[in-house]
Image: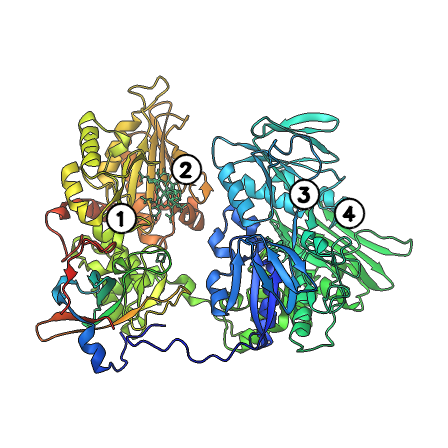
């Protein structure tokens, strides 16, 4: 906290009488155990210190599959970010490894040389990837051969993504056809890598299902374009300084650029072993999660062995953590962990998989009910003994899984008509199923959320599905339970579920979707962002995070009539340059179609010299970036360059990449350079809900990468041009959809402008075309843009023309700043007028 | 801006006139170096002013370049938000320091650093 007054800092704290709790391992189990302890008032009893050899806070390891596939960013999977530790007064040694425990002196030795005393110790070291014996796996210095990856940590995942997306790496082999291997395969595919899975077992995911289910899964996986090699053992990794392939026993070598090893996990027990704790397959604990024969040492998570079982999924560790916390805080010293019946429900490589108990009948008297529909990838198998479910596997359709899990867990009596275990035969509807679910039935297995926890959240007033998911974290793991979460919320709200209204708002601060917002702006004749807040926001309250979106929208709608309030702009748009990590800016002059001239290059070189530009760089957008320019130098840099802005900073039309085309290239069928330059001249600086990047290629070899652009044009034989929209090759990869094939460059320009205007008017704020086009549907877009099915073509063309006519090069503000101190530095401040002290 | 009572001693010691208010456009912020401290002063749309430290505790972002509303300033680098009144972060970052700021009869900005 801050104040103008100095507060006394030494508010006579009596010596801390709390006991010292030390936790080794800052993963899902360790952090969860601490959360449970805090929930039981542990902060009053303990000062808490945690060691984690990953240099981060605790993150949701399950979500790494999504990070690999690019569906989630790595920043979004943190469960406990660093401030959480500070807020709870937990000392976190991130990036520090505990090496040894002195059980008698009660000390933990760590690899930073530290010695930390404890009164109570928790070991939660988890597991690591198992690396089977293969020749060539390691280099001489003992590190993994470049191109070989494990799949366990956020760093593994980041490294895999960066390797997969660099240096023409195209082919990967995944060793291991279990849950992790399939997830890795699917994730790599989304980076355009072709993947083959090598599995030593006779069928995929053999820990979760029998051969019949495995066979159907193989078909589903192959249908995704992933190659599968069963009964194949990898004997060697090939390649001298980086991976070039793998050698299989009795089968031809597979060539590849990277290898992911997902051949199982091994508990991390080194610390326990060197410290003399009981270790068999893992650290042995009793029903109170105490390490055998230790009074003050507990263990939790994948590193423990309990009643002979070692677990490899998260659901059991939630139960363990609760029991552990009961004992550590003495909240309930009778609490006992009795083991988990692992019913897993997962989404693996996009396929729903649920499995519980045994996979196949074991006795002659066991009943076995099987349904198999390979063409749809659906397989269901249930094993019944003495009128109770003792095992089930569901693949491709897990609608009955809630009921089956409960029947399995509690041994519920089963219906005579067994087929109703698998399907709803006009019988009780899904909601009834939800109503019948026991209160403590776990709905989200990833984050351990029960039906009751969801219902309580609804009762406490949170009546939107998204709100309940945010509060409880349900559905935020593998995502396979989202449907069930929705059903439970609907049931608990008793019909009063509210749509999450904010989800449809154009900007968070104005409760309206885009059409309503645009209509209100028109009807009320609003002309500036502050007028919009005053008229349309709750209590007329401004919202900083809404300003930029509103400014862009109003400029698009009103062109010249827009009253441009500069505080509504993000700093980039105030100073027409992109802010950098140190508060300096980058300057990217316009270079239409990637075409430049000796004179331009000379001027750029002179500017780079004169302002000692730290880096001059060719961009991915075919132009030149001058990085590290001081804010106060911007106007003079622009004046010296005497080139227009390339808009590399805005949510706006950016560039048109081109290839050399017909004039020079022996394959070119159209003058792509000329058309690209014309398109860029026409649409320069047009603002839009998100960036628009275009390209024109002279033939289907596509050297300007037109298929992965917001609008991409390709010349084809016969003087014709294809127009693709909604392509992407950034955070997401998507091939554009063919909008039209037309005869002449003029029509290309018209349809390009019309499409962009339609997108500007209808897309959500920050929604790129790669999301907009599939949301609206290419058929609909083609009908509107090409066939004018709604009769708005003329209107769209006119609106775009108005924006084109309104273009002014923002770098002209160099000679006539728009606001006082527009280019005054904000940091560092040495150069500021230092204020005299009075 | 803190409304804490200020003792007479600190009043004279840490009071700085940093120049006319109109060097800050409405709705924006500007940075000032004051006896070794870097301070961002914002002019809100309701006409009032606020002052907080100018360097983002997250990774050193230039707070004066941030966008504001009546309640918070949002750092331009990674969008952490801080209350203009208290400096406290509403996004879990460490706080900014807040300063007492006002204007005098000639519309000059007066900052207090103690
Ligand atoms: C300079 C450049 C990298 C380079 O050195 O080549 C670049 C630099 C940045 N890109 Fe990029 N992108 C650059 C080409 C690309 C490309 C390739 C292209 O344009 O052909 C892509 C993939 C295509 C695309 O846009 O999808 C690309 C996809 C992104 C993305 C992911 C967008 C997405 O939705 O997938 C971001 C993040 C965002 O927009 O939120 C991003 C964001 C950024 C920002 C603006 C990050 C930021 O907010 O500060 C970087 C600014 C660095 C700086 O300080 O100036 N940049 N960026 C390239 C400038 C091109 C130009 O001349 O305008
Ligand atoms: C890609 C992937 C996908 C998965 N998907 C699913 C899924 O869909 N469903 C599911 O139920 N489970 C899934 N799992 C398994 C789940 O993530 C684990 O069961 C869970 O993370 C185990 O928690 P833990 O705390 O025991 O171990 P971890 O989360 O591994 O935490 C242990 C931590 O301790 C640290 N550590 C180890 N030794 C030391 C030491 N000596 N000093 C300091 N720190 C140390 C480690 O670095 C690690 O950060 C998945 C796992 C992966 C890798
Ligand atoms: S330039 Fe683009 S890819 Fe490179 S670090 Fe910045 S945002 Fe990431
Ligand atoms: S530097 Fe301010 S939010 Fe990161």
Between disc 4 and disc 2, whose residue precedes?
4
Residue receiving disc 4: A210
The answer to which of A21 and A628 lies nearer the viewer is: A21
Task: Give the percent coordinates (x, y) of residue A452.
Answer: 62, 73
State whether discs 3 and 1 lie on one chain. yes
Residue receiving disc 2: A708
Q: Tell me the distance, in whole angstroms, between the alpha carbons under discs 2 and 3.
A: 32 Å
Residue receiving disc 3: A375
| Residue A24 visible in the displayed image | yes
Residue receiving disc 1: A584
Q: Residues within 10 Å of mark 3 (few under 14, many from 20)?
A: few
Q: Identify the residue at image location x=75%, y=35%.
A: A231
3 vs 4, front mark: 4
Left or right of A731 on screen, residue A523: left
Instruction: Say whether mark 1 is within 8 Å of ligand 1.
Output: no
2 vs 3, front mark: 2
């Amino acid at each position: 906290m801050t104040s103008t007054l100095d507060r006394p800092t030494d508010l006579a704290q009596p010596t801390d009488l709390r006991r010292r709790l030390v936790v080794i391992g800052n993963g899902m189990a360790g952090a969860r155990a601490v959360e449970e302890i805090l929930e039981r008032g542990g902060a009053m009893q303990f000062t808490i210190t945690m060691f984690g050899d990953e240099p981060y806070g605790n993150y949701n390891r399950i979500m790494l599959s999504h990070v690999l596939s690019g569906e989630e960013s790595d920043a979004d999977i943190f469960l406990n970010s660093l401030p959480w530790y500070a807020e709870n007064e937990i000392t976190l040694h991130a990036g520090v490894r505990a090496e040894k425990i002195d059980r008698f002196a009660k000390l933990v030795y760590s690899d930073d040389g530290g010695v930390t005393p404890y009164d109570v110790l928790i070991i939660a070291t988890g597991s690591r990837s198992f690396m089977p014996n293969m020749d060539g796996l390691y280099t001489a210095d003992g590190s993994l051969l470049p191109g070989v990856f494990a799949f366990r940590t956020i760093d593994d995942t980041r490294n895999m993504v960066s390797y997969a997306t660099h240096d023409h790496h195209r082919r990967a082999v995944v060793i291991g056809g279990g849950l992790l291997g399939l997830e890795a395969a699917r994730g790599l595919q989304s980076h355009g890598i072709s993947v083959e899975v090598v599995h030593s077992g006779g069928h995929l995911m053999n820990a979760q299902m029998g051969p019949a289910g495995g066979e159907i899964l193989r078909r589903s996986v192959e249908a995704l374009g992933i190659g599968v090699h069963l009964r194949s053992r990898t004997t060697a990794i090939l390649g001298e300084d980086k991976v070039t392939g793998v050698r299989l026993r009795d089968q031809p070598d597979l060539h590849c650029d990277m290898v992911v090893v997902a051949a199982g996990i091994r508990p991390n027990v080194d610390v326990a072993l060197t410290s003399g704790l009981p270790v068999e397959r893992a650290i042995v604990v009793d029903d109170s999660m105490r390490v055998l024969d230790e009074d003050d040492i507990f263990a939790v998570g994948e590193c423990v062995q309990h009643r002979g079982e070692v677990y490899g999924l998260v659901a059991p560790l939630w139960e363990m953590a609760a029991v552990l916390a009961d004992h550590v805080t003495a909240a309930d010293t009778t609490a006992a962990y009795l083991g988990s019946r692992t019913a897993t429900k997962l989404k693996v490589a996009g396929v729903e998989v649920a499995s519980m108990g045994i996979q196949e009948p074991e006795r002659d008297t066991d009943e076995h009910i099987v349904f198999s529909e390979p063409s749809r990838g659906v397989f269901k198998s249930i094993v019944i003994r003495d009128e109770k479910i003792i095992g089930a596997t569901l693949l491709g359709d897990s609608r009955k899984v809630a009921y089956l899990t409960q029947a399995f867990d509690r041994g519920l009596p089963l219906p005579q008509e067994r087929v109703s275990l698998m399907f709803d035969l006009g019988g009780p509807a899904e909601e009834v199923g939800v109503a019948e679910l026991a209160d403590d039935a776990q709905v989200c297995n990833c984050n351990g959320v029960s039906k009751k926890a969801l219902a309580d959240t609804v009762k406490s007033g949170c009546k939107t599905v998204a709100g309940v998911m945010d509060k409880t974290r349900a559905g935020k793991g593998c995502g396979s339970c989202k449907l069930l979460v929705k059903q439970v919320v609907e049931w608990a709200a008793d019909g009063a579920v509210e749509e999450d209204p904010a989800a449809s708002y154009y900007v968070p601060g104005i409760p309206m979707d885009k059409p309503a917002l645009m209509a209100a702006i028109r009807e009320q004749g609003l002309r500036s962002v502050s007028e919009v807040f005053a008229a349309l926001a709750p209590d007329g309250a401004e919202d900083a995070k809404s300003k930029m979106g509103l400014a862009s929208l109003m400029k698009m709608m009103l062109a010249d009539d827009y009253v441009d309030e500069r505080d509504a702009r993000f700093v980039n748009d105030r100073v027409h340059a992109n802010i950098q990590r140190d508060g300096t800016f980058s300057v990217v002059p316009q270079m239409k179609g990637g075409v430049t001239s000796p004179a331009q290059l000379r001027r750029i070189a002179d500017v780079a010299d004169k302002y000692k530009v730290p880096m001059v760089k060719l961009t991915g957008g075919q132009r030149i970036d001058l990085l590290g320019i001081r804010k106060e130098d911007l106007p003079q840099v622009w004046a010296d360059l005497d080139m227009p802005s390339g808009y590399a900073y805005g949510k706006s039309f950016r560039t048109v990449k081109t290839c050399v085309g017909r004039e020079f290239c022996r394959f070119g069928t159209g003058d792509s350079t000329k058309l690209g330059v014309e398109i860029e001249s026409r649409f320069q600086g047009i603002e839009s809900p998100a960036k628009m990047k275009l390209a024109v290629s002279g033939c289907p070899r596509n050297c300007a990468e037109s298929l992965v652009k917001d609008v991409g044009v390709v010349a084809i034989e016969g003087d014709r041009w294809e127009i693709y929209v909604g392509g992407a090759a950034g955070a997401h990869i998507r091939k554009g959809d063919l909008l039209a094939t037309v005869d002449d460059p003029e029509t290309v320009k018209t349809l390009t402008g019309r499409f962009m205007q339609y997108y500007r008017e209808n897309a959500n704020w920050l929604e790129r075309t790669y999301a907009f086009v599939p949301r609206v549907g290419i058929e609909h877009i083609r009908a509107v843009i090409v066939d004018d099915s709604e009769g708005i073509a003329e209107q769209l063309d006119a609106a775009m023309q108005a924006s084109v006519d309104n273009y002014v090069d923002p770098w002209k503000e160099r000679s006539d700043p728009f606001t006082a101190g527009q280019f005054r530095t904000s940091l560092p401040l040495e150069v500021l007028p230092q204020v005299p002290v009075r | 801006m803190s409304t804490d009572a200020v003792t007479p001693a600190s009043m004279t010691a840490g009071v700085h006139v940093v120049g006319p208010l109109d060097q800050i456009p409405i709705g924006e912020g500007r940075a000032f170096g004051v006896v070794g401290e870097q301070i961002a002063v914002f002019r809100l749309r309701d006409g009032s002013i606020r002052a907080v430290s100018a360097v983002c505790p997250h990774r050193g972002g230039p707070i004066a370049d941030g966008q504001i509303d009546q309640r918070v300033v949002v750092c331009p680098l990674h969008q952490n938000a801080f209350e203009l009144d208290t400096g406290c972060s509403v996004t879990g970052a460490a706080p900014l320091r807040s300063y007492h700021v006002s204007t005098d009869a000639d519309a000059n900005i007066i900052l207090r650093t103690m």
